[in-house]
Amino acid sequence: MSPDRGGGAEALEQMYRRLHNYYGEMHWWPGDSAFEIMVGAILTQNTNWRNVERALENVKREGCLDPVALWTCNDDDIERMIRPSGFYRIKTKRIRAFLEMVMGEYKGDVRQLCDTETDALRERLLAVSGIGEETADSMLLYGAGKPIFVIDNYTRRILTRHGVITDDWSYGDIQALCMRAGDNTAERYRAFHGYIVNTGKEFCRKVPRCAGCPLEMMT
């Protein structure tokens, strides 16, 4: 595991306070149900959220945003509904694999799935074809309400630019560090991740816009 060089947890706590003061309360990752959020986590792979919203609206419009209803759809129907999200054939296969797990192991009961112990559920999600660590953790945090930190490209970029981590840190290394900072609650992790996403989109882009960034003067 990469070492925590120079008080990384303290730096993260300072980041959280600055971003909280700047953005205030946030309710990141909209969704009317755990299942919608979980499907959205698959759809958001390699696309922007607006495209995901369009795809989810199509699924809702046809009354299929439910595990049993979506399970009864054929692949052509799923592809048609989620086409706005891009890579729709690949994502259809991933949704189908996820549905096989939900229907086969939980009889379509998403509440039972969400009640599964965090580590066991994470392991099960990672065994589903096409679901990697970021997608699984998004499902766990935002869908199931589990206290686990999601590591995405924005997180890695911001923490690297501020010297908290280096390029060789793995997903698990970064996650472990983030989960040592502050309160270990789903509410905090949701807020912090939302702050990071907003900061990455507004300021810490591939070409950074440091002027006015809430983290600009952080040492």
Image (cartoon, helix red, strand yellow):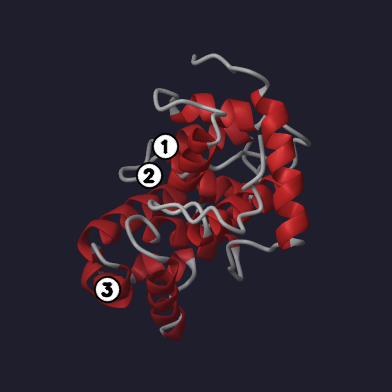
Task: Say which residue label 3 marks.
Answer: 83
Which three-letter amino acid code belongs to the residue tagged 3? Arg
Residue 73: x and y in percent read: 32, 71
Secondary structure beneath dot 3 equals helix
Residue at 43% over, 45% down: 153
Name the residue type under label 1: Leu
Whether the residues at callouts 3 and 2 have beta carbons within 8 Å, the answer is no
Q: Is residue 17 left or right of residue 170?
A: right
Whether residue 109 is visible here, answered yes or no, is no
- Tell me where residue 47 sits by quadrant: bottom left
For disc 3, the neighbor class at 10 Å (few under 14, some 14 to 19, many from 20) is many
> Marks 2 and 1: in contact by CB < 8 Å?
yes
- Looking at the image, tell me whether mark 3 or mark 1 is earlier in sequence order: 3
Viewer-side residue, 57 vs 70: 57
Q: Is residue 31 above or below residue 212?
A: below
Q: Which mark is residue 126?
A: 1
Provide the secondary structure element on which disc 2 rests.
loop
Q: Which residue is mark 2?
A: 131
In the rendered structure, find residue 203 and report the number of the disc placed on it. none
Query: Which secondary structure, mark 1?
Result: helix
Q: Which label's residue is closer to the chain start, 3 or 2?
A: 3
- Local crowd size for mark 2, using a 10 Å CA cut-off: few (<14), some (14–19), many (≥20): many
Cα separation, mark 3 vs mark 1, equals 24 Å
Q: Nearer the viewer, mark 3 or mark 1?
A: 3
The quarter of the picture where the C terminus appears is top right
Cα distance between the residues tagged 1 and 2: 6 Å
Q: Amino acid at mark 2?
A: Ile
